[in-house]
Amino acid sequence: MLAVFAHPDDESFGAGGTLALYAARGAQVHLICATRGELGEAPPDRQGFATVAEMRESELHCAGRILGLAGIHFLGYRDSGMPGAADNRHPRALAAAPRSEVARNTAGLIRQLRPQVIVTFDPVGGYFHPDHIAAHRAAVDAFSLASDPAAFPGDGPPYSPQKLYFHLLPLRLIRWAERLLRWVGRDPSRFGRKGDIDLTALAKVSFPVHARIDIRPALAAKREAAACHVSQGGGAAAGLPLGLARVFGASEAFMRGRPQPPPSRIERDLFAGVDEER
């Protein structure tokens, strides 16, 4: 399995339960992290690290050990910040990088790692983050490019991954949170530590659920891995209190991008139908 995400913490706060679950079952689970999260929150002392990027990379390796990741692979782009930020236009920003370039770099790693299943963000990047959307597009393009013998002949032999999934944020929880914020007099369109997440817009986004993975056996690992990301909220952002987590966080939902058409019933295993000989 290969997860394609944008920043350190995306792997834990998002599909971390699924990654930990399959790693515990013996799958080789790798992560592509497109940036080192240079624009993330940081304490004044940066926990002794010279840069925010070094601090967040260290947090990611902590989380990776807990999730059981077999490897973490950086693409080397720069964090772009939220939509409309000046950092979107930085020369090394992921959001500013040519789509074809990011896809080629991703396809090269797919050929090297040979995953049967790939997991990435949904088409709106979860909450409209430019880097998340760029990572989604790279994964979608690379899924096909990796198997094309005419594409990038110097990047290793062609390889065809079998399934592609998009992790979906819990829509029920988002809609519940939006209503609660309105009830207490807060603006749900300015949610988050920086007020740059629009829950009102997110509550209107709806993608079909094609797979739902029961992550209860891996829930503790997901919470512990999320807690590694101290600079991004750590334990506070690791998830809901356990009681609510069992209601809203006991499973992780996915939309299937490939193969089409989607399954006739909700899948309970992302490896269902995978040919292990390929």
Image: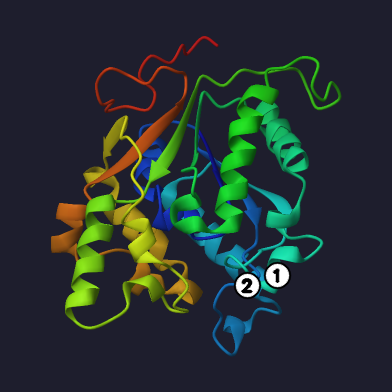
Eyeballing the image, is 119 above or below 158?
below
Q: Quadrant of residue 44?
A: bottom right
Eyeballing the image, is 155 above or below 176?
above
Viewed as shown, does residue 277 lie left or right of 13?
Answer: right
What residue is drawn where x is 82% and y is 25%?
A: 152
**Mark 1–mark 2 contact, CB under 8 Å?**
yes
State the residue position of label 1: 87
Q: Is residue 165 visible?
A: yes
Viewed as shown, does residue 243 lie left or right of 112?
Answer: left
Of the numbered discs 1 and 2, the one sitting upstream in the chain is 2
User: Which secondary structure lies at badge 2?
Assistant: loop
What residue is drawn where x is 63% and y is 83%?
A: 48
Q: Is residue 32 visible?
A: no
Residue 156: percent from the left, percent from the top? 78, 23
- Which sits in the foreground, 137 or 238? 137
**Mark 2 is on which residue type?**
Leu
Residue 181: percent from the left, percent from the top? 24, 75
Mark 1, residues whose alpha carbon is within 10 Å: few (<14), some, or many (≥20)? some
- Which sits in the foreground, 39 or 203? 203
Q: Which mark is residue 39?
A: 2
Residue 24: percent from the left, percent from the top? 37, 38
Q: Which mark is residue 206?
A: none
- Which sits in the foreground, 189 or 167? 189
